[in-house]
Image (spheres, rainbow, N blue to C red):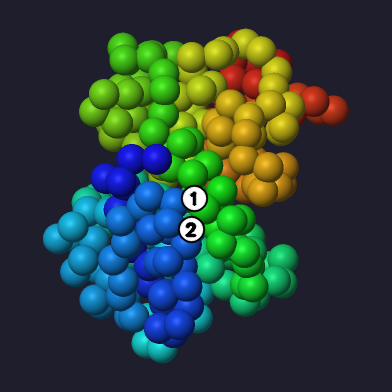
Amino acid sequence: MSASKRVLIVDDEAPIREMIAVALEMAGYECSEADNAQDAHAQIIDQKPDMVLLDWMMPGTTGVEFARRLRKEEVTADIPIIMLTAKTDEDNKIQGLETGVDDYITKPFSPRELVARLKAVLRRTTPKGVEEPVTVDGLTLDPVSHRVTADEAPLELGPTEFRLLQFFMTHPDRAYSRSQLLDMVWGGNVYVEERTVDVHIRRLRKALGSRHDYLVQTVRGTGYRFSAQVA
């Protein structure tokens, strides 16, 4: 693992930050720490870490509110985020994913699990794919500039939705199961549940708007297909 990968650990409990930092540094990552959202934001702008590990429950601005802010700001919109939380309730998990975080780890977790998850997220947030722009019915994805336009108007997509759309647009007219999409788009991360695919498909359709949402088609009993031909 390249030591150049920098991870920002945001948690108000120093012992937890220290435990995570030790595990990640042993795995070859550089770590920096913050105990609140304000300090974390300053470090993200200044240092541009490759990943943010973010605690759900913090005094002041919560992890969910902070993640939402990062996703809204252009400079930080694409930064991978893993949420750390003691919350196991499914609604909270869905809320975390809806915010746009890339993964979700419930405390207590083992350092090995954390490192495995982190590697998987970093692997899938460094997309391998075409360098040339792809266009389908006025919808254009440019992998180099990381932009998506609909009839030349820019669309706002989260990083996972961008990867999902990039995969779909370069593999059209074929049905993929949720587990296949997890392998192709999420990098075979065994910790991500298949239901996560549905969450991001819904967000992708919403981002595409009524003009292009027909391209992402549900294939009953199988999964999803990207096609300009109406099923």
Q: Amino acid at mark 2?
A: Ile
Q: Is residue 73 above or below residue 217?
A: below
Would you call the spot at circle 2 few (<14 residues within 10 Å), some (14-19), or many (20 or more)? many
Q: Please indicate whether residue 166 sits to the left or right of residue 116 in the image.
A: left
Which residue of the protein is positioned furthest toward the front in this rendering? 26
Image quadrant where one finds the C terminus: top right
Q: Left or right: where does residue 26 sit relative to residue 154? A: right
Q: Quadrant of residue 218?
A: top right
User: What residue sits right under mark 1 in the picture?
Assistant: 118
CA gap between label 1 and label 2 equals 8 Å
Residue 156 spot, x, y in % from top left: 35, 42
Q: x, y (%) of residue 101?
A: 48, 55
**Relative image position of residue 42 (x, y in whole percent):** 19, 69
Depth check: give the residue in front, 226 or 80.
80
Residue, far bottom: 59
Residue ID at (63%, 67%): 109
Quadrant (top left/top right/bottom left/bottom right) for the N terminus: top left
Q: Is residue 137 left or right of residue 41?
A: right
Residue depicted at 61% across the width and 56% down the height: 113
The residue tagged with tag 2: helix, strand or loop? Answer: strand
- Residue at 56%, 36% (x, y): give it: 186
Going by the image, does 228 lie left or right of 40? right
State the count of labels.
Answer: 2
In the picture of the structure, the residue carrying the numbered disc 2 is 82
Vertical position of residue 214 compared to residue 159: above or below: above
- In terms of sequence position, does the residue under pointer 1 or pointer 2 come before the other? 2
Answer above or below: position of 129 versus 120: above
Residue ranking furthest to the right: 221
Q: Are the residues at dot 1 and dot 2 in contact (C-beta closer than 8 Å)?
A: yes
- Mark 1 residue crowding within 10 angstroms, few (<14) / some (14–19) / many (20+): many
Residue at the far left: name it. 46
Residue type marked 1: Leu
